[in-house]
Amino acid sequence: MKTFPTYVLQRSRLAGSVALLISCVVVTWMSGAVAITAKGTAVQTLPRTQRFDQHRLTPFNLIANWIVLSVKINGRDYHMLLDSGAPNVISTSAAVSLGLDVEGRYTGWGVGKREITGGETTVSRLRIGNVVLHDQTFHVIALPYAFTHGFSPSIEGVIGYEVFRRLVVRVDFQRSTIRFLDPQSFHYHGKGVVVPFYLEEHVPVVAGTVDGLQGAFQIDTGSDGSLSVTSPFVARKDLVRRYSAHIRGFAGEGVGGRENAYFVRARVLHIGGADIPSVVTELLDDTGGVGAMQAVAGFIGTAVLKRFNLTFDYTRNTIYFEKNANYNRPSVFNRAALAPRITPEGLKVVSIFEDSPAAAAGILPGDTILAINGHTGDQLNGPFLFDILRQPVGTVVRFTILHAGVEKSVQLKLRDLL
């Protein structure tokens, strides 16, 4: 049997198409004149003539388990996600506002089975903290409504692989800072676990186990979740039966649509030399999109990754995991068991989990949420919803909902379902 480091060297040469992560991967293929190709492990480092202060820290906000950076694109301020496997992405609306020329056309797929289309543009100057990159290629797509309307300020794109492949990136979740380092002079001196990876569609993939089951797992800072297991792996290992899974519902939305999953709690997720206990796990039942990928067992998101401070060194196919103060804090599952979705028509209830506080309160899929604890309208945004549904056990939450044209008030008491 091959050791994982050998497997890393072999698989890292096989990356074939662009990967785009907006809470989940989107694999794209080409139609038209624009050539989008992967570069395998050929990593371009920052030119020596483009100097920057390696000792300066770039702050970020961890919002609903997304790493949100303030960046400047051609001198204008935007907020974007930091995603370990994505190419540069900018929303269609931001590209229009900047007057960027969008060329070509590509189609692709992501979460769910819906295809997406987009173009390509060039940004003359991208500034992230003290790092300035010139003539950067950006993919232009229409982002999900919840990204551009569910945050204040709105999220207008993604910064990812194009930065990671040029620089060593250290993410300190404990202090909410990022440090960019020159890979040509970088030497790791910390006490973290050294974890090798290979690139699958530009996304780092590591060896791991979940409750003793071996698999290859993507390291996905573009996901707000803990652990999502792909539907082929779920089927092969008979995980729905193995975990006696019964809680099922809406599991999120990316650029390609929505997905559903069973929710369970894995006892131990093992990455490198670290055992991570009590991990909320999505058993995806996707029939298309990235949730149905055969190549990996699952995706490890920020809800798990934030238990570490991470140093990404793409030039050496290595990530360094250092436990931080969050390490022993277990993942918290939605304690209302109500899955809402931000839409142009308002905050819609997508699914209600069985035997849950939301079900007991009489809230139904299709209802519109008008208020939560007196908060209304734009106050019902992504960060607020993330926090309110994870308040301590026993917290009473008051809802005003619209059902079949009738407004009513209900309340529910939060409790653990997993």
Image (cartoon, grey):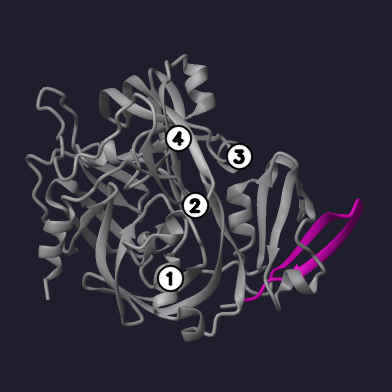
Note whether 206 is above or below 144 in the view shown: below
Which corner quadrant of the image does residue 343 belong to?
top right
Q: Earlier in the sequence, mark 3 or mark 1?
A: 3
Circle 4 sits on which residue?
157
Amino acid at the residue labelled 3: Tyr
**Numbered circle sitting on residue 329:** 1
**Residue marked by disc 3:** 145
At label 1, which amino acid type do we have? Arg
Residue 160: x and y in percent read 33, 40
Q: CA distance from mark 3 to mark 2?
A: 15 Å
User: Which residue lies at the image location 78% right of the left edge and 63% below the top edge?
Assistant: 364
What residue did someone put label 2 on? Answer: 111
97 with respect to 374 (left or right): left
Q: In what quadrant of the picture does the C terminus appear?
A: bottom right
Q: What secondary structure is marked by label 3?
A: helix
Query: Which segment is the magenta one?
Result: 395-416
Disc 4 versus disc 1: distance between alpha carbons? 30 Å
Is 415 part of what is drawn in magenta?
Answer: yes
Disc 4 marks a residue whose amino acid type is Gly
- Where disc 1 sits, the SS reads loop
Measured from the top left, where is residue 205 in percent x and y?
Answer: 27, 59
Nearest-to-viewer mark from 3 and 1: 3
Q: Along the polypeptide, which appears first: circle 4 or circle 1?
A: 4
**Residue 418 got which mark?**
none
